[in-house]
Image: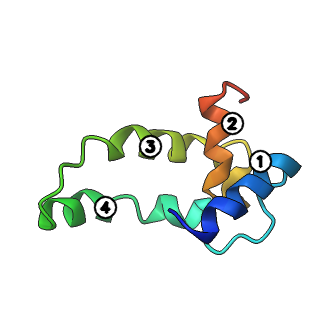
Amino acid sequence: MAGPSVGQTARQLASGDYTAGVASRLAVQVAGVPTFPNTAEQQGVGPELLTPCFTLMRRRPAPGGGEEDLTGVIDLLAGER
């Protein structure tokens, strides 16, 4: 999540529109969550840091954020929703 996505994230945060220019909807990313721990394990990476992010990702689509980019999760960190 570096390079061009940083600019995209900044633009979304500035505008408040987390659906602009979305390449992978949050709902799709949440659907893929079960594969991440296995992939991390296969790569020799501990999944411990993934769990908090996945918890937030699962919470965000509930209020209608499934069409958003991952940027919408920042609202949860900031206590917005």
Q: What element carries label 4?
A: helix
Q: Is mark 1 on a helix, strand or loop?
A: helix
Q: Residue at x 72, y 42 (%)?
A: 63
Instruction: Give the quarter of the image for residue 6.
Output: bottom right
Q: Mark 2 highlights which residue? A: 75
Q: Relative to residue 76, is residue 56 drawn left or right?
A: left
Q: Which residue is drawn at 53% across and 47% down?
A: 57
Mark number for residue 53? 3
Closest to the observer: 66 or 42? Answer: 42
- Of tags 1 and 4, which is closer to the observer? 1
Q: In this view, does 75 lie above or below 47?
A: above
> Marks 4 and 3: in contact by CB < 8 Å?
no
> Residue 33: image x %, image y %?
39, 58
Q: Is residue 2 above or below residue 50?
A: below
- Amino acid type, label 4: Phe
In terms of sequence position, does the residue under pointer 4 or pointer 2 come before the other?
4
Mark number for residue 13? 1
Q: Distance between the residues labelled 3 and 1?
A: 18 Å
Closest to the observer: 17 or 14? Answer: 14
Q: Residue at x 77, y 47 (%)?
A: 13
- Amino acid type, label 2: Asp
In terms of sequence position, does the residue under pointer 1 or pointer 4 come before the other?
1
In terms of sequence position, does the residue under pointer 3 or pointer 4 come before the other?
4
Q: Mark 4 highlights which residue? A: 36
Q: Distance between the residues labelled 1 and 2?
A: 9 Å
Q: Residue furthest bottom?
A: 23
